[in-house]
Structure formats: C-alpha cells, structure tokens
Image: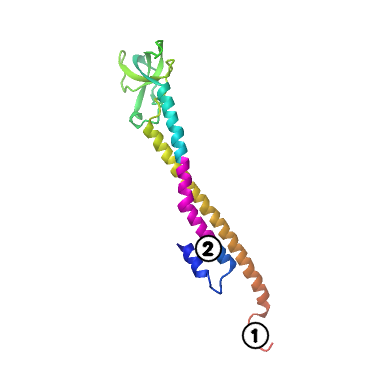
Amino acid sequence: MRAISGLWRWRHNPLRRTTDLVESWVALVALLLILVAAPVIGSVVGSAAQDALQRSVRDQQAARHLVRATVVRQADRLALAPDPETSSERGAHSRVVADWTAPDGTRHHGPVTSTLRSPHAGEHFPLWTDGHGRAVTRPLDSATATTHAVLAGLGVAVLSAVLVEGIRRLIVRRLLRRRYARWEKAWERAGPDWGRTGTGS
C-alpha cells in the first residue's frame, strides 16, 4: 500500500526525483510478486512434490509387506524405531532376534527392531519386509506424504517472498547510495558560496 500511495503522491510532485519514482515502482512490483508470484510458485512446487510423494507411497505400499515375526530372544542392545515417519512408533523399541516368513515363502532369522517394549521368547509382532523377506521400514503413508508436500510448497513460497524482498532492499540501497552521491556533489558545488549571498563579498 505504501508503494501505491507513493506512486500516486510522486506522480505530479515538482520535487519528485527519478530515484523516488523508481523506488516506488520497485516496491509495487515486489509487493505484487510477493502476493501473487510467491504463492503460485509454492503451489506449483507443492503439487509436484505431492505427485512425486504419492507415487512413492504407491510404490512402497506395493513393494513392502507386513508379516508376523516371532521373538527368539532379546538382542544385546536397545534401539529406537527405524521409522521416524510414524509418530505412533516413536517410543522406545526393542532390538530382538526373531524368525519370520517372507512373502515368497522363505524363512528368515536375524536381529530386527520390534514394537514390543518388553519382548519375551515366543511373542509375535508385526514386521515390514520387502518381497524377499529383508526387514525394511514401514511404507510412507498418504497423509504423511501430503504433509511433506504442503510443507515443501509453503517453504518455497516463503523463500520466494524473502528473495523478492531481499532484491528489493538491494535495489533501494543502491538507489540511496546514488542519491547520497548526488547530494554530495551538489553540496560540493554549493558549499563554497553557501551563506555569501547578499553579504557583498
């Protein structure tokens, strides 16, 4: 709004300098870019991220399978859940040695992270594996993918707005330097005669 009012104020002002008009136009263009271009860019990036992440969700859900594993014994050390994507599984998880059968029918045995807080031999727990039975993290879910896409779009929109504002400030700074340089030159020309008018000297 200051840019618009500035343009209107300087339109026919006899004291208007070229730098004043340029500064007002730069502010107006920056305002339009922040209000229009930045959200559009953020929306485009967010939409592209959403498409890519949803494809990843479909691929992971098709390639990863939930099987039932059986605890053989507790492993020597504790570990956190390997899947930071899921807030419901962020508590302490147990590292165990377990047996499970892969989707292709092969049997597997080895250390994995279980969802059991106090595992005992013979207990069962869900385990995500690939088609060959290798333990993997759970697949990305659609809601989490959407959240990441929205955050990506918002982040790009904010960065775009910050970039535009930074460019505007650089331009205004150069205009101010040019203005001060002109003032200095004008003062140098007027300085030797300052105050002598009408003194008879």
> Of all residues shown, which one is farthest toward the top?
106
Amino acid marked by disc 1: Thr
Q: Is residue 38 visible?
A: yes
Between label 2 and label 1, give the one nearer the viewer: 2
The residue singled out by tag 1 in the image is 197
- Picture residue at 46% right of the left edge, 63% below the top: 2
Mark 2 or 1, nearer chain start: 2
- Taking depth in this image into account, of 163 and 73 the one nearest to the observer is 163
Q: Residues within 10 Å of mark 1 (few under 14, many from 20)?
A: few
* Residue 44 is inside the magenta segment: yes
Image quadrant holding the N terminus, namely: bottom left
- Taking depth in this image into account, of 79 and 20 the one nearest to the observer is 20
The part of the chain drawn in magenta is 25-45
- Checking the image for residue 133, the label placed there is none
Q: Is residue 76 visible?
A: no
Helix, strand, or loop for circle 1? loop
- Taking depth in this image into account, of 118 and 1 the one nearest to the observer is 1
Above-or-below relation of 101 to 59: above
Which percent across, then down, holds residue 56?
44, 29
The residue singled out by tag 2 in the image is 24
- The quarter of the displayed image where residue 63 is located: top left
Amino acid marked by disc 2: Ser
Above-or-below relation of 186 to 31: below
* Residue 37 is inside the magenta segment: yes
